[in-house]
Image: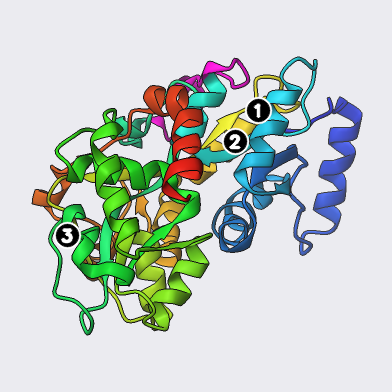
């Protein structure tokens, strides 16, 4: 739909021009401009490849990416919430951050009637303030040459492995959740897991600042096991890093990346168009192939061989555990303080 009204005379002139030049292709009508907040790197590139170029651009949408890590973008959204108009229409965040921003009054409550693909969304991926785009689960990864196959989070942080254990600093929340599950607690009962983490650290477990640094340590065999999202593990396997993965017996915490619409978005229609495009079967199928994450729509088609690598069996699916986002939002400051001042000390 054009962003400006078209007069009858202009329309007739346009039809006449088209008739005079029947062999020329007709450019798509300008639908508008939509600004997307996203991480950079592969994710941003694949948004362009699988959503923006093939689906939105032919419909006349001009997409502009506002790339940054989640922390500065989250701060920006919250800082702009009192403005009449924000600077971004739609933002990509984890489900935990979507909950936090929504509860802070900075995200639009999703009107699912505005999405033609709404009926295909997996129920657990329908949030009040956002929609899941892709998901994976936290698993135990290990080098079979260096350690016996673990079966649980408890095995992954057993002090007997000493300096062969690796933790990722930026994943402090889910590491603490995994340790809680290992100790018999739950996703909203992290205190039980703290002693296990301290025992592993005392035994020589190593801490890496980023996912990439952890991957490099696995590649060089500096470490032999740790915890990571299965999708990222598949990417690392594709890159030749020697690792295998196990769905932990205690439960598989889910990691969901999705999108929210800023409450003061300049172009909410564009934001809904972007959401609808990300839910298209073609886009969801492509992300499964390109990133190793599972689709969040029921009509996606993932080949059996790929599903075996990126997905979870029927038995494992019963162990998938969604995080308690209200708990994490409430306790995050205390969790970070313990992690920095006690665990990392």
Q: CA distance from mark 1 to mark 2?
A: 6 Å
Q: Give the crowd class for mark 2: few <14, some 14-19, many >=20 residues within 10 Å.
A: many
Cα gap from disc 1 to disc 3, whole angstroms: 49 Å
* Secondary structure of the residue carrying numbered label 2: helix
Residue 236, horizontal then vertical, whole percent: 40, 73
Residue 88 position, x and y percent, is 73, 34
Identify the residue at image location x=31%, y=36%.
Answer: 122
In the image, residue 93 above or below residue 332: below
Q: CA distance from mark 2 to mark 3?
A: 45 Å
Q: Quadrant of residue 107?
A: top right
Circle 1 sits in a helix, a strand or a loop, which is it?
helix
The residue labelled by disc 3 is 155
Do the numbered discs 2 and 3 sit on residues whose CB atoms are within 8 Å?
no
For residue 153, above or below residue 4: below
Q: Which residues are magenta?
A: 103-118
Image side of residue 25 versus residue 123, left or right = right
Question: Would residue 71 be counted in the magenta stretch?
Answer: no
Q: How is the image coloured?
A: rainbow
State which quarter of the image contains the N terminus: top right
Residue underneath mark 2: 273
Residue position marked by numbered label 1 in the rendering: 269
Indicate whether residue 115 is drawn in magenta: yes
Relative image position of residue 103 (x, y in whole percent): 52, 17
Can you give x and y, in whole percent of width and height, for residue 261 in the image? 60, 28
Determine the residue located farthest toward the left in the rendered image.
315
């Amino acid at each position: 739909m054009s962003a400006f009204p078209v007069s009858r005379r202009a329309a007739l002139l346009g039809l006449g021009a088209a008739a005079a030049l029947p062999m020329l292709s007709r450019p798509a009508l300008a639908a508008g401009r939509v600004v997307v907040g996203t991480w950079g790197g592969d994710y941003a590139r694949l948004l362009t490849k699988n959503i923006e170029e093939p689906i939105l651009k032919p419909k006349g949408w001009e997409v502009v990416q506002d790339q940054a890590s989640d922390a500065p973008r989250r701060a920006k959204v919250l800082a702009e919430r009192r403005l009449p108009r924000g600077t971004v229409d739609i933002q990509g965040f984890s489900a935990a951050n979507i909950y936090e921003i929504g509860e802070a009054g900075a995200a639009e409550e999703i009107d699912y009637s505005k999405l033609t693909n709404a009926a295909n969304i997996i129920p657990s991926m329908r949030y009040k303030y956002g929609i899941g785009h892709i998901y994976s689960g936290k698993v135990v990864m290990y080098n079979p040459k260096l350690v016996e196959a673990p079966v649980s989070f408890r095995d992954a942080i057993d002090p007997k492995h000493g300096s062969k254990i690796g933790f990722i600093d930026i994943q402090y929340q889910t590491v603490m959740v995994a340790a809680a599950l290992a100790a018999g607690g739950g996703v909203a009962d992290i205190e039980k897991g703290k002693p296990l983490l301290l025992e592993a650290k005392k035994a020589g477990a190593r801490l890496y600042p980023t996912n990439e640094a952890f991957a490099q340590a696995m590649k060089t065999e500096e470490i032999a096991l740790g915890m990571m999202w299965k999708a990222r593990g598949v990417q690392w396997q594709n890159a030749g890093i020697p690792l295998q993965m196990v769905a932990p017996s205690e439960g598989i915490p889910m990691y969901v990346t999705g999108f929210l619409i800023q409450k003061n978005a300049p172009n909410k229609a564009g934001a809904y168009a972007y959401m609808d495009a990300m839910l298209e079967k073609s886009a969801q199928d492509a992300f499964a192939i390109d990133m190793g994450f599972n689709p969040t729509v029921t009509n996606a088609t993932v080949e059996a061989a790929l599903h075996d690598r990126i997905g979870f069996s029927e038995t494992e699916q019963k162990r998938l555990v969604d995080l308690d986002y209200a708990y994490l939002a409430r306790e995050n400051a205390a969790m970070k303080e313990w992690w920095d001042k006690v665990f990392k000390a």
